[in-house]
Amino acid sequence: MILVLVLAAGLVGAEVLRHGAADPAPAATGRDPAPVQRTDPGAGATSPPGSPTPGTPTPDVRVPVGGFLSWAFLDRRSGRITGSGNLTAASDTMSMVKAWLAADYLRRLPPDDAPSEARLDALTRMIRDSDNAVAQDLFAILGRRRSIERLVTICGLTESEPYQDTWSNTAVSARDTVRIGLCLADGRAAGTRWTPWLLDEMRRVRGVGDFGIRAALPAALAPQIAIKNGWLLRDEDGLWHIACLAIGPDWVVGALARYPGRLGFEYGTELCRGVGEHLLAGRVHPGYVANAP
């Protein structure tokens, strides 16, 4: 990979990320970095769903960045993943993991049971409005870190793991982010009955959490894209941590970023939008409008 830093007004640089590059050194954090696990299946082994295919071409992504940026693209038709050279580098999820918490709760319901109206309303607030209190309550109900362990197992993740006893600090890579998106979309996460409901709630994300990858799409297409983003200016390291997930009809895109707090929240939203702009150019078509819910 060739990294080109171009200093400009208001920006600390421009990073060109290409498939096959070495991982850059991660930004310093206030916690011990989660180990990045790399798997190399032996002969005859089966890779997890969405494993990258060697030799798959990946477009360059040029977006302003100051700090850490990683991204991945999953083609839902083939299951192939392409991405930045550091697509296996770990960052954290923040509120992005709330989509999994909802799915884990719904999948574990008895077949003939349904959540109360109050519980469904709470899940809606957690997904659409990113309600932290609901997430904390649900995390406890689900067994705390055991829920994240199920995420790793059910979705076939290879670089992700729980961090202590929190949901916000869940370690995840860009590659695993798109695997999570596929897991949410194909029914493994929430189960057949509740997957349509969950994806519809993710399409209805609103307020401060409605940013990033789908913002790169035309206004008529964006409402069809299911999203869940995470964002936090962490006191431990003074960095904005951003996580973006978008699920389209035949693709999933994920992006992770960390950068100096002085650059502001909007800097991170533009990073995710820029990744979406470059990766989704030419991949959307008018038929999406006809298929809108």
Image: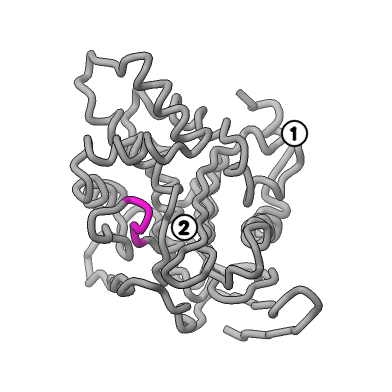
Q: What range is drawn magenta here?
A: 167-171
**Label 1 SS:** loop
Residue 173 image offset from top left, x and y in percent: 41, 64
Q: Is residue 148 magenta?
A: no
The answer to whether residue 38 is seen in the rendering is no
The answer to whether residue 154 is seen in the rendering is yes
At a point 76% along the width and 41% down the height, the residue shown is 218
Nearer to me, 198 or 231: 231
At a point 19% along the width and 21% down the height, the residue shown is 110
Residue position marked by numbered label 1 in the rendering: 220
At a point 26% along the width and 58% down the height, the residue shown is 162
Q: What secondary structure is the magenta-colored segment mainly?
A: strand
Residue position marked by numbered label 2 in the rendering: 80
Which part of the image, by quadrant, shows the C terminus?
Answer: top right
Residue type (three-letter) at the residue carrying disc 2: Arg
User: Compared with residue 64, is residue 282 higher up or lower down, i.e. above or below?
Assistant: above
At a point 34% along the width and 21% down the height, the residue shown is 119
Q: Distance of mark 1 from mark 2, alpha carbons? A: 27 Å
Residue 49 image offset from top left, x and y in percent: 35, 53
Density class for disc 2 (Cα within 10 Å; few <14, some 14-19, many ≥20) is: some
- Choose the circle earlier in sequence order: 1 or 2: 2
Q: Quadrant of residue 12?
A: bottom right
